[in-house]
Image (cartoon, coloured by chain):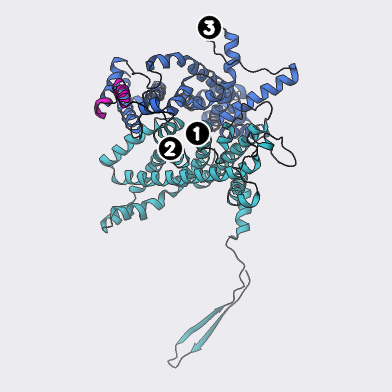
């Protein structure tokens, strides 16, 4: 097991290095210069000497390969550089916002799980009945509906709904407060984006639960369990579900990594100052240092999630770790 | 089966009997399944009711996109501040936005943008993936290894993150959005096509083709590519919905299609939230258009997958 773990861990590095190369050189293909944009953005005259100073400050005057190795060296020394836009250290900017995005991501996953698993089970057990059809339509609709639009609809619904019932419109709070300071405030603000993204992510997991359970229910041992007269409830809970949930766990953990991507748009809708918003802002401001570090962070989370799923599989299924 | 076979038998000088002519009256009932257009449609309706529903949505969208000028006489980019944020009614069927532009018109023209981006990205992305995947399987060795590592790297990026990184490099605009969406599609398709092509490479006719001295390009294009059409078409149709959704997301973030072009995602960005209370219709219609389009393409894609891939049919 230890050997497998180390082998699998070593495989992470080529992917991460590849991603670093791709992101770094992709972002430097651009014509234009952040210093020129920053100093002369609105068409004003900028002093060439000042631009030169700014370039020197950001390390842009160095040859591109030197810049690349500085970028890689930053991971060794845990210094991710400075934002080209605000000038603040990137680690600081990220740590300010990380817990917000993480909290929304965790809440979305939770929403996705509590929707997907019961609905998937009902849909599989009652295959080809009207309940099954409703669940499947609900799931397909979730995949088709953009989460930002669902977010807009939720805001609209809240405004109009509270206006109808309480006489005055209510909006989720705009100002962010951490959960340990004011839990009610925090939850009432973050539950809506979590629902908007969670619903969308539940759709894939629902379909996965349904098809995995259907497959297991056709297995011989389930037939045996039925033949010996077990109650259907016991068959589903004790025999079928345990085996069916493995692929569902995979889907949910991999989607957790993709949530970071999904939140890019949702944070914009709900005006949350998280990593997704920081990413969009850095793209808009051509702040490449920030953009590349955020992309690398998302890739890292994705690769790590994949790694954990692999380990989980190897732990559950000895055939994998010995092959 | 009705009909008759009549044979003319002649006795020649030599004394041999030959059958000189056989006349077959063509009165047989047609035993092969009818392949008329209507027959095909009714078969599809029976076998794939959801897919047909998807196809109807897709056809309606194509119709809207092609005949936009005939369907509406209003200019989608014409500001008309007099009628700012008019509620849906007789004059403007779906209401107007904050610049007084007719929403129905902009949704009809938006179909054009969405379909253009969707089809271009899906076709280019899956075609490049097809060639790359087949070549990777065919050549094997170092070439395959390098391509697969590159595919690994690109697939470690969530779609929208990679698309945004490309937009960061190229800047917004329709052409750049198409490039940004196409790039993540290529490796996805290449991976699926490669695994199918690996099996085909082992079939003896490929060896036969090599023995005949055909060029690599000819073997790849004439002998391998036609045999991986099923996974290729499955990927292509599944990309269509994704591309439309991704374009809408990018445009919503202001990183995609730019004003004043009519695009659904952009319509949601342009103040949909600010006017949420006073003019909810601005936020509702474009979202319905996006959802319906993606819904239609997904259903259609699922039907294509079920038809082409018997293994998945039971699910």
Q: Colour of chain B?
A: cyan
Q: Which residue lies furthest to the top in this view?
A: A181
Chain letter, disc 3 residue: A
**Above or below B224: residue A162:** above
Which of the numbered marks, if any, corresponds to residue A322?
Answer: none
Which residue is located at x 26 percent, y 56 percent? B211
Mark 1 near mark 2, Cβ–Cβ under 8 Å?
Answer: yes
User: Residue A245's spot in the image, x, y percent?
Assistant: 51, 25
User: Residue A69's spot in the image, x, y percent?
Assistant: 26, 24
Q: In which quarter of the image is the N terminus of chain A?
A: top left
Which residue is located at x 60 percent, y 58 percent? B37
Along the line of sight, which residue is nearer the eye, A205 or A90?
A90
Q: Nearer the viewer, mark 3 or mark 1?
A: 1
So how many labels did they put on this image? 3
Q: Check disc 1 and report the residue beneath it.
A: B250
Task: Mark yes or no: residue B237 visible.
Answer: no
User: Residue A156's spot in the image, x, y percent?
Assistant: 66, 25
The chain letter of the blue chain reads: A
Which of the numbered marks, if any, corresponds to residue B180?
Answer: 2
Q: Give the magenta-colored segment's residue range.
A: A47-67
Most frequent secondary structure within the magenta stretch = helix
Q: Quadrant of the C terminus of chain A?
A: top left
**Label 1 environment density (alpha carbons within 10 Å; few <14, some 14–19, many ≥20):** many
Cα–Cα span, label 1 and label 2: 10 Å
Q: Check disc 3 and report the residue beneath it.
A: A180
Per the image, label 2 sits on a secondary structure element best described as: helix
Which residue is located at x 63 percent, y 44 percent? B105
């Amino acid at each position: 097991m230890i050997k497998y773990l180390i082998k699998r861990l070593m495989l992470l590095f080529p992917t991460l290095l590849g991603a670093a190369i791709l992101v770094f050189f992709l972002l430097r293909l651009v014509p234009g210069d952040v210093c020129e944009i920053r100093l002369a953005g609105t068409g004003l005259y900028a002093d060439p000497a000042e631009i030169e100073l700014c370039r020197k400050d950001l390390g842009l005057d160095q040859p591109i390969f030197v810049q690349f190795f500085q970028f890689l060296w930053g991971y060794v020394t845990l210094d991710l550089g400075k934002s080209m836009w605000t000038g603040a250290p990137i680690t600081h900017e990220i740590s300010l916002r990380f817990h917000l995005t993480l909290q929304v991501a965790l809440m979305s996953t939770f929403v996705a799980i509590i929707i997907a698993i019961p609905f998937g089970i009902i849909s599989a057990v009652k295959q080809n009945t009207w309940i099954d059809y409703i669940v499947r339509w609900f799931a397909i609709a979730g995949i088709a509906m953009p989460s930002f639009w669902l977010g807009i609809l939720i805001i609209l619904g809240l405004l109009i709904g509270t206006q109808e019932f309480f006489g005055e419109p209510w909006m989720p709070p705009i100002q962010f407060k951490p959960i340990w300071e004011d839990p009610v405030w925090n939850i009432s603000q973050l539950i809506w984006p979590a629902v908007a993204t969670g619903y969308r992510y539940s759709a894939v997991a629902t379909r996965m639960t349904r098809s995995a359970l259907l497959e297991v229910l056709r297995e011989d041992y389930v037939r045996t369990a039925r033949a010996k007269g077990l109650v259907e409830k016991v068959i589903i809970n004790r025999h079928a579900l345990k085996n069916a949930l493995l692929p569902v766990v995979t889907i949910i953990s991999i989607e957790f990594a993709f949530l970071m991507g999904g939140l890019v748009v949702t944070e914009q809708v709900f005006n949350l100052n998280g990593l997704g918003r920081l990413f969009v802002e850095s793209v808009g401001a051509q702040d490449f240092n920030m953009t590349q570090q955020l992309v690398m962070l998302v890739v890292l989370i994705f690769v790590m999630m994949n790694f954990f799923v692999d380990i989980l599989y190897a732990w559950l299924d000895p055939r994998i770790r010995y092959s | 089966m009705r009909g008759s076979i009549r044979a003319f038998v002649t006795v020649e000088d030599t004394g041999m009997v030959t059958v000189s002519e056989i006349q077959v009256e063509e009165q047989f009932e047609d035993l092969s399944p009818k392949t008329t257009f209507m027959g095909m449609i009714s078969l599809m309706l029976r076998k794939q009711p959801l897919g047909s529903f998807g196809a109807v949505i897709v056809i309606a969208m194509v119709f809207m996109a092609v005949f936009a000028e005939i369907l509406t006489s209003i200019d989608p980019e014409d500001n008309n501040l007099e009628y700012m944020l008019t509620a849906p009614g007789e004059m403007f069927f779906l209401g107007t936005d904050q610049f007084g532009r007719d929403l129905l018109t902009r949704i009809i023209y938006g179909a054009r943008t969405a379909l253009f981006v969707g089809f271009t990205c899906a076709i280019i992305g899956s075609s490049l993936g097809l060639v790359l995947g087949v070549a990777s399987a065919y050549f094997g060795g170092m070439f395959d290894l390098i391509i697969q590592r590159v595919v690994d790297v690109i697939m470690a990026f969530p779609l929208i993150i990679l698309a945004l990184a490309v937009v960061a490099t190229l800047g917004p605009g329709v052409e750049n959005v198409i490039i940004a969406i196409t790039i993540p599609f290529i490796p996805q398709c290449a991976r699926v096509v490669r695994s199918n092509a690996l099996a085909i490479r082992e079939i003896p006719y490929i060896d036969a083709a090599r023995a005949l001295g055909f060029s690599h390009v000819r073997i790849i294009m004439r002998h391998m590519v036609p045999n991986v059409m099923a996974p290729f078409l499955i990927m292509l149709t599944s990309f269509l919905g994704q591309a439309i959704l991704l374009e809408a997301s990018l445009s919503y973030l202001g990183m995609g299609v730019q004003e004043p072009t009519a695009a659904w995602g952009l319509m949601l960005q342009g103040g949909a939230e600010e006017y949420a209370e006073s003019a909810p219709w601005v936020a509702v219609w474009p979202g319905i258009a996006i959802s319906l389009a993606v819904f239609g393409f997904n259903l259609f894609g699922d039907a294509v997958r079920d038809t082409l891939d018997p293994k998945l049919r039971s699910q």
